[in-house]
């Protein structure tokens, strides 16, 4: 429980939605916990208690508010901003590692003992990895109960509960309703009857500028794997138990997400990866306030507040695409990637669009014939070296990986310079301070704005943008007339 309460109290009394996900307010007199922006009349100060996670509030015996649905609030931005053990653990828990591999598997991935991981996570979040995973399972169950017609037994399995009894007990404890009562409360809403199809609203902290976020993903889309159709960015997903197709459409107060999954157990992982792709758990106010202290960036931030960093749903995929994009145009990089997809990607069926393949996994590229690659020999060697390192585990780009260590591993590979390493750090690892000082678009923007054009001088100037240099890059790129900076005016199929 938080000891310093003054800031929390002010946020609750002003219903400040910027703090949703940062902490949760428990009310002693009602036994419920809420997000700070809950629309009900704020409780008396003496009845408030504050917790750093929904799991901690649940462990203390509080149930989720039925009005503000705190379990559906944006995630804490800390897990995007930090690279310590707790942040890495939270990224892995969000990706479903505890459900699939247990706490021992989580600890192994982090390189710590179970006891060390338990102690550090509990000290900061008020709950251990199992409780955090349980809270995530409860949220997955609620989504399936309210938005599908799936039988409750199937939902329990999809949400990774060990038994129907545990499923019923958890839902009742967290939401103070039985699964059947939870479903009956949703009246007039649309529920999908299609097996494996689910519509979800992905919340975010305002403001959000979708132009460069969706524009970048659309402009660099690999045919067969990604597309822009009917106002939505669509792509295929490789998931732990199968594959999926996701459609993401920007709306004023959320991102509309439509998921088609071959295995419903992948729901939590798919949602987590989509949120990561769109950087939806960022704290845009903190980012913009820091960048606006530089007079050069201040007008850019004021013109387009809330820019996010477009990321990826598969770090290995992006690393391969970064190598394919070395010293070539966006169009050429897409062409190279499309050829790999057709030759080595796993085919899938897309009933709602034109997606045809999953992007090739490192394992499927391990036997790649370099002579089939229409690129210089040096870049062929770079690509094959990366693939070999990913397969062997010599390079770790997973959700719980260490950013500093991953940079060192990448830099040791032949053909990996600062641009490639920092591009992967920014978009695959999610480091908010990654900075591609040698990028052509950044150089052109620097010259246009009167900033130092040389990489060394620009890095020195950019120290005032830390720890948000990756977001500064988005503003610099946006000064140019490039398709990555805008959502297409005409929807294409």
Image (spheres, rainbow, N blue to C red):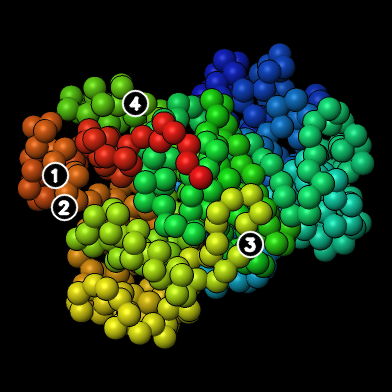
Classify residue 380 as left or right of residue 141. left
Identify the residue under disc 1: 443
Q: Does residue 31 sit above or below 405 in this rendering?
A: above
Point out the tag, 3 or 2, that comes first from the N-terminus: 3
Classify residue 195 as left or right of residue 423. right
Identify the residue under disc 3: 349
Residue 262 position in % (x across, y down):
70, 62
- Labels 4, 3: front one: 3
Secondary structure of the residue carrying numbered label 1: helix
**At 78% across and 54% down in the image, what residue appears?**
195
Classify residue 433 as left or right of residue 8. left
Instruction: Using the image, tell me which numbered label, if any, was put on residue 438.
Output: 2
- Would you say the residues marked 1 and 2 are in contact, meaning their CB atoms lie under 8 Å apart? yes
Point out the tag, 1 or 3, that comes first from the N-terminus: 3
**At 45% across and 75% down in the image, what residue appears?**
343
For the residue pair 214 and 419, the one nearer the viewer reads as 214
Point out the tag, 1 or 2, that comes first from the N-terminus: 2
**At 32% across and 80% down in the image, what residue appears?**
372
Residue 484 in view here: yes
- Would you say the residues marked 4 and 3 are in contact, meaning their CB atoms lie under 8 Å apart? no
Point out the tag, 2 or 4, that comes first from the N-terminus: 4
Distance Cα–Cα, label 1 vs label 3: 42 Å
Secondary structure of the residue carrying numbered label 4: loop
Q: Residue 191 sits in which quadrant?
A: top right
For the residue pair 130 and 3, the one nearer the viewer reads as 130
């Amino acid at each position: 429980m938080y000891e310093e309460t003054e800031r929390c109290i002010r946020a609750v009394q002003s219903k400040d939605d910027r703090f949703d996900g940062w902490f949760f307010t428990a009310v002693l007199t009602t036994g419920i916990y809420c997000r700070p922006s809950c629309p009900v009349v704020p409780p008396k100060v003496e009845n408030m208690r504050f917790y750093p996670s929904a799991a901690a509030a649940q462990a203390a015996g509080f149930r989720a508010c039925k009005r503000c649905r705190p379990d559906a609030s944006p995630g804490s931005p800390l897990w995007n901003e930090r690279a310590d053990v707790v942040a890495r653990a939270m990224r892995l828990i969000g990706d479903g590692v505890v459900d699939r591999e247990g706490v021992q598997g989580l600890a192994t991935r982090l390189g710590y003992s179970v006891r060390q991981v338990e102690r550090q996570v509990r000290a900061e979040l008020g709950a251990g990895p199992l409780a955090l995973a349980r809270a995530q399972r409860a949220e997955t169950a609620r989504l399936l109960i309210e938005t599908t017609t799936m039988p409750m037994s199937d939902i329990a399995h999809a949400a990774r509960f060990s038994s129907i009894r545990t499923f019923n007990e958890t839902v009742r404890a967290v939401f103070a309703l039985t699964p059947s009562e939870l479903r009956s409360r949703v009246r007039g809403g649309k529920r999908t009857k299609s097996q494996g199809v689910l519509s979800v609203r992905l919340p975010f902290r305002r403001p959000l500028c979708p132009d460069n976020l969706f524009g970048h993903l659309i402009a660099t889309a690999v045919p067969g794997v990604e597309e822009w159709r009917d106002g939505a960015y669509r792509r295929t997903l490789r998931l732990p138990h199968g594959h999926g197709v996701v459609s993401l459409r920007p709306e004023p107060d959320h991102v509309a997400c439509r998921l088609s999954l071959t295995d419903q157990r992948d729901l939590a992982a798919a949602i987590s990866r989509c949120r990561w792709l769109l950087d939806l758990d960022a704290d845009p106010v903190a980012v913009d306030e820091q960048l606006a202290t530089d007079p050069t960036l201040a007008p850019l931030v004021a013109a387009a507040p809330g820019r996010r960093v477009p990321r990826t749903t598969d770090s290995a995929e992006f690393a391969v695409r970064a190598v394919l994009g070395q010293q070539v145009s966006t169009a050429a990089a897409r062409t190279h990637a499309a050829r790999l997809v057709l030759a080595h990607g796993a085919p899938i069926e897309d009933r709602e669009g034109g997606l045809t393949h999953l992007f090739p996994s490192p394992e499927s590229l391990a036997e790649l014939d370099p002579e089939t690659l229409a690129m210089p020999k040096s870049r062929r060697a770079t690509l094959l070296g990366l693939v070999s390192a990913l397969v062997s585990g010599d390079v770790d780009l997973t959700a719980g990986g260490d950013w500093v260590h991953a940079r060192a591993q990448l830099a040791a590979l032949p053909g990996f310079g600062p641009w490639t390493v920092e591009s992967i750090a920014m978009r695959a690892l999610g480091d908010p301070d990654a900075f591609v000082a040698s990028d052509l678009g950044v150089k052109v923007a620097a010259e246009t704005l009167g900033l130092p054009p040389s990489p060394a001088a620009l890095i020195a100037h950019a120290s005032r943008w830390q720890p948000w240099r990756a977001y500064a890059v988005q503003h610099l790129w946006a000064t140019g007339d490039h398709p990555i900076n805008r959502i297409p005016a005409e929807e294409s199929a």
